[in-house]
Image (cartoon, rainbow, N blue to C red):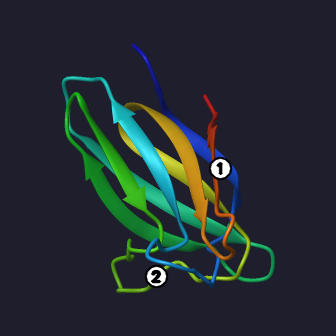
């Protein structure tokens, strides 16, 4: 089976500013190669505040899902704060592959980066 059920992304940061038409954002990019639907839970960890839990989403069988971190809400309607560093734990009901991407449009020379998450199993 390709993928793991638990992943770590140690560097997260939603830039508070955007220039032009594109909005600065991050995404957790998921690939589900299984024949089963993936239930996915994101937990956000911070330097000086308690974790934010219960960000729930899904990825269909043999599908991909780009989870925009500037748009996802937890079960209480709270969003990931901007301008605050965080780390992310991604837990899935089935093995998935996880990649992290960031689009920073806070200045004219925008930056895009992506990196693979760390599997914990």
Callout 2 environment at 10 Å: few (<14), some (14 to 19), or many (20+)?
A: some
- Report the side of 42 relative to 120 (left or right): left
Where is mark 1, residue-wise? 9
- Find the residue positioned furthest to the right: 47
Measure the alpha-carbon separation of dots 2 and 1.
18 Å
Where's residue 79, x and y in %?
Answer: 46, 82
Q: How many marks?
A: 2
In the figure, residue 84 lies in which quadrant?
A: bottom right
Q: Are marks 2 and 1 in contact (CB under 8 Å)?
A: no
Indicate the secondary structure of the residue bearing disc 2: loop
Where's residue 21, x and y in %?
Answer: 43, 76
Where's residue 100, x and y in %?
Answer: 57, 47
Which residue is depicted at the point 30% across and 24% down?
33
Q: Nearer the viewer, residue 116 or 121?
A: 116
Q: Nearer the viewer, residue 2 or 94?
A: 2
- Report the side of 21 relative to 44 (left or right): left
Quadrant into which the N terminus falls: top left
Where is mark 2, residue-wise? 79
Q: Nearer the viewer, residue 102 or 96?
A: 102
Would you place residue 12 above or below residue 38 in this image? below
N-terminal label among 2 and 1: 1
Which residue is depicted at the point 65% across and 49% down?
9
Indicate the secondary structure of the residue bearing disc 1: strand
Callout 1 environment at 10 Å: few (<14), some (14 to 19), or many (20+)?
A: many
Q: Which mark is residue 34?
A: none
- Find the residue positioned furthest to the top: 1
């Amino acid at each position: 089976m390709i993928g793991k059920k638990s992943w770590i992304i140690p560097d997260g940061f939603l830039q508070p500013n955007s220039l032009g038409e594109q909005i600065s954002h991050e995404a957790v990019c998921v690939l589900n190669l299984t024949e089963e639907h993936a239930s996915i839970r994101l937990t956000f960890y911070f330097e000086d505040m308690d974790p934010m839990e219960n960000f729930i989403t899904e990825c269909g069988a043999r599908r991909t899902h780009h989870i925009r971190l500037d748009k996802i809400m937890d079960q209480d309607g709270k969003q990931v704060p901007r301008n605050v560093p965080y780390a992310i734990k991604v837990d899935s009901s089935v093995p998935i592959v996880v990649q992290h991407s960031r689009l920073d449009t806070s200045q004219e020379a925008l930056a895009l980066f992506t990196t693979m998450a760390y599997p914990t199993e």
